[in-house]
Image (cartoon, rainbow, N blue to C red):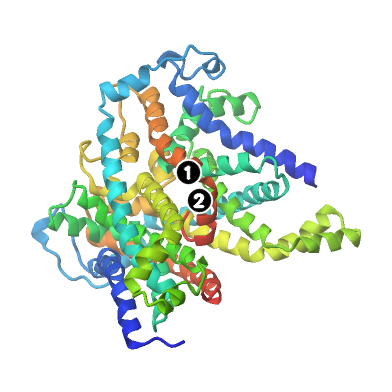
Amino acid sequence: MSRWVARGAAALVALSAFPLAWMVVASLAPETRLFDAGGVWRGPFVLDHYRALFDQRDFWVPIRNSFIVAGSTTVFAVALGAACAYALARMRFRGRYALLAFVLAVSMFPQISLVAPLYLLLREAGLINTYPGLVLPYLTFAMPLTIWLLVGYFRQLPADLEEAAAIDGAGRLRTLVEIFAPLAWPGIATTAILTFVYCWNEFLFALSFTLGPERHTVPVAIALFRGQYQVPWGQILAAAVVATAPVVLLVIAFQRRITRGLTAGAVKG
Amino acid sequence: MSASPSERREAWLFVSPAIATIAAVAIIPMAWTVWESLHLHDLRMPWLGRPFVGADNYLEAFGDERFRDAMARTFAFAAASVSLELVIGLIFALAMSHALRARALIRVLVLMAWAVPTVVAALVWRFMFEGPSGVAGSLLAALGVVDAGFSWFVHPVAAWVPILLADAWKMTPFVALLLLAGLESIDPSLYDAARMDGAGAWRQFREITLPLLRPALLVAVLFRALDAFRVFDVIYVMTGGGPGTSTEPISLYTFTTLLQHLRFGYGSALSVLVFLTTFVLALLYIRLVGRNLLEAKP
């Protein structure tokens, strides 16, 4: 049994590593050898596709757009979400369970159900194809996500933290800044990373509410790559590597924390 | 300890900015979708205005073959992908809980697949199945599964294979993480006791692991079913719903109705139907996860 599991796992590890490895190797292959499945591994390796990506296509634009949109959404959602989660996790008041259920329910909204009204709203406000026109829709999933994750983290902190501070005569705000925040910091950072990854990878809203390459985010830009005569696979693969690198590096750097955050929240995939 | 009025006021001060934001960006728009779905609203024909048509859009949807097919397809896709991911995810989780040395490596791989943008996952898998000489396509041809030069994306049934593989590749890691958390909550002394009673590995798995893993399995199934029902990115990038509409899920049909046909009234009715379908699944999920949360009082 355990040997069987080990073998199965080894095969699965190889299978799951292969597509990413193939993506990186093929992105370095000359255009003529892209579909030479046996020969790609042997090289020669060239940076042609990466050069074309940044020289001809100006791929910096979608990268900048993605950083701006994902970054602003994260800052906004974590700031508001932390205050909300603090009250939900550590203060006693009527209605907090109802609020938690409400937040969880909103996180289940199918994105497609919000496309029509958000499009009409943003069009009315002149926000189609702008940064706020993406940040606002992104809050629909980022707010519930941050609140839910942070409630989980804040609950794990010692229960008598605030009471001890209150006995010492510290007010709510001082307790929050001087005692709670330093302890809560790792949870907040993890939440921020997870939120950033979700925003970086988001596709449907970005596709619906942007019009041109000047505001496309990275996933939309890659999905809409077109060549003059054929699909520019070399550049698509290079762009895929570039799009994946930031989030994968983030996740690997913080892997222990993130594993815990993902399963503790168990709310978003 | 009961809440003093001042603590209550403070608490509402803390929660209201976030709750107000959620109301503004999600609740009001959702209500608007319902309202919109009761009207004729075609952006290509602005001179028609936005007259109230009652349930007409819904009646049209029930008579719309493309809608019914998309719905059925989405359910079939959800069932297939969730089963696939559950089986593979369980093997991964078992391996991670046993193989302590390989654990770090597996965790990195799992997290990498999770962090990869869905669009990228879809493109890489499309590349591997593209044309007669994509690496996965030619491998399967060499193994005799299909004829050499088989074109995966022009065949209405075969086109689902790369879609399912890409989706499973991307989402199984998350299922594995959920199940691993469940496995770790099982008391190891149960296995020791079973071993002393002479139970083999398979019996231990069947009589201890599976029953005690049920809550985690249920959460994983519901969670992934919800997600799979909303599938959009993978299919948009891999097939665009084609050939024809043979891989078109309900989200993609709704998206096309809204932003390509510009039929906002009808598209909103489709959105509401998607919403109601997921709502049932979501309620089940909230009851499960929510109850755990309520039990773990601070």
Vertical placement of A64 versus B46: above or below?
A: above
Tell me, yes or no, if residue A113 can be seen here.
no
User: Helix or strand or loop: what does disc 2 sit on?
Assistant: helix
Q: Which residue is mark 1?
A: A251
Residue B283 locus on image (x, y percent): 47, 71
Q: Considering the numbered disc 1 on the image, is that residue within a helix, a strand or a loop? A: helix
Chain under numbered label 2: A
Three-letter amino acid code at the position of disc 1: Val
The span from disc 2 to disc 1 (Cα, nearest Å) is: 7 Å
Left or right? Give the position of B158 relative to B55: right
Task: Specify whether residue A92 is in view.
Answer: yes
Q: Which residue is mark 2?
A: A258
Q: Earlier in the sequence, mark 2 or mark 1?
A: 1
| Pick the front one: A183 or B131 | A183
Q: Nearer the viewer, residue A19 or B266?
A: A19
Q: Is residue B276 above or below residue B250?
A: below
A157 displayed left or right of A240? right
> What x and y, as percent, mark residue A170?
36, 74
**Residue closer to the observer: A13 or B297:** B297
For the point 22% across and 55% down, the residue is A119
User: Mark 2 and 1 residues: CB-CB less than 8 Å, in contact?
Assistant: yes
Residue, x 61% and y 35% (percent of image)?
Answer: A15
Q: Does A224 sit above or below residue B253?
A: above
